[in-house]
Image (tube, helix red, strand yellow):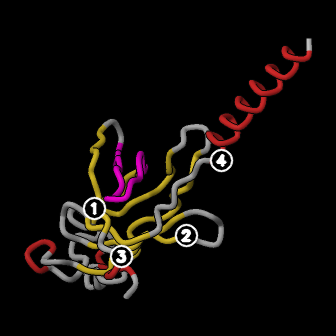
């Protein structure tokens, strides 16, 4: 009888620890990432726990373009791309275990779309951008830590 109680307790503890871990697992996505289009974007936490992202470097983006020439708001087309906030509202979903509900602005076409971070690893993050029924998966490469600390 004592062995059965002990076994039940051990199984309960193991199950509880796995359930607790899966519900609280949350990867830190803070950092600087290079997007496939060459932009370097810094993801950072906001006070409310959501994440935002802004452009730090252009790296010959769009043949050297430095202004937001495709912005749907004509009065913003002379705004600099450096420092522009591209990502807002990205929050961690504990049930799905992904970052979602983000909105990202794509300066190439002047469009806004939904953003999710599906996976985070040492080399970068896997993101999915979607608008209406269309979606595109991309890998954003993490920029070296020496550059991040500048």
Residue carrying label 4: 24
Q: Which residues are magenta?
A: 116-131
* Mark 3 nearby-residue class (10 Å; few <14, some 14–19, many ≥20): few
Residue carrying label 2: 45
| Mark toward the start of the polypeptide (3 vs 2) | 2
Q: Is residue 104 magenta?
A: no
* Mark 2 nearby-residue class (10 Å; few <14, some 14–19, many ≥20): some
Mark 3 touches mark 4? (CB < 8 Å): no
Q: Which label was assigned to residue 141?
A: 1
Question: Taking 128 as reference, is 44 left or right?
Answer: right
Can residue 75 be seen by looking at this rendering?
A: no
Can residue 45 be seen by looking at this rendering?
A: yes
User: Which label sits in the foreground, 3 or 2?
Assistant: 3
Question: Taking 53 as reference, is 21 left or right?
Answer: right
Q: Residue at x 20, y 60 (%)?
A: 36
User: Which label sits in the foreground, 1 or 3?
Assistant: 3
Label 2: which secondary element: strand
C-alpha gap between disc 4 and disc 2: 17 Å
Q: Position of residue 118 (x, y in %)?
A: 42, 45
| Mark toward the start of the polypeptide (3 vs 4) | 4
Label 4: which secondary element: helix
């Amino acid at each position: 009888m004592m062995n059965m109680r002990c076994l039940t307790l051990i199984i309960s503890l193991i199950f509880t620890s796995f359930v607790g871990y899966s519900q609280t697992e949350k990867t830190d996505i803070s950092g600087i990432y290079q997007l496939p289009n060459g932009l370097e974007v810094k993801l950072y936490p906001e006070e409310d726990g959501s994440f935002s992202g802004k452009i730090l470097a252009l790296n010959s983006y769009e043949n050297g373009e430095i202004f937001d020439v495709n912005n749907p708001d004509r009065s913003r087309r002379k705004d600099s791309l450096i420092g522009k906030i591209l990502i807002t509202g990205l929050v961690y979903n504990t049930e799905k275990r992904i970052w979602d509900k983000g909105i990202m602005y794509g300066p190439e076409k002047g469009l806004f779309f939904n953003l999710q971070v599906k996976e985070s690893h040492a080399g970068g993050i896997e993101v999915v951008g979607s608008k209406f029924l269309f979606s595109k998966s991309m890998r954003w490469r993490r920029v070296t830590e020496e550059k991040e600390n500048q």
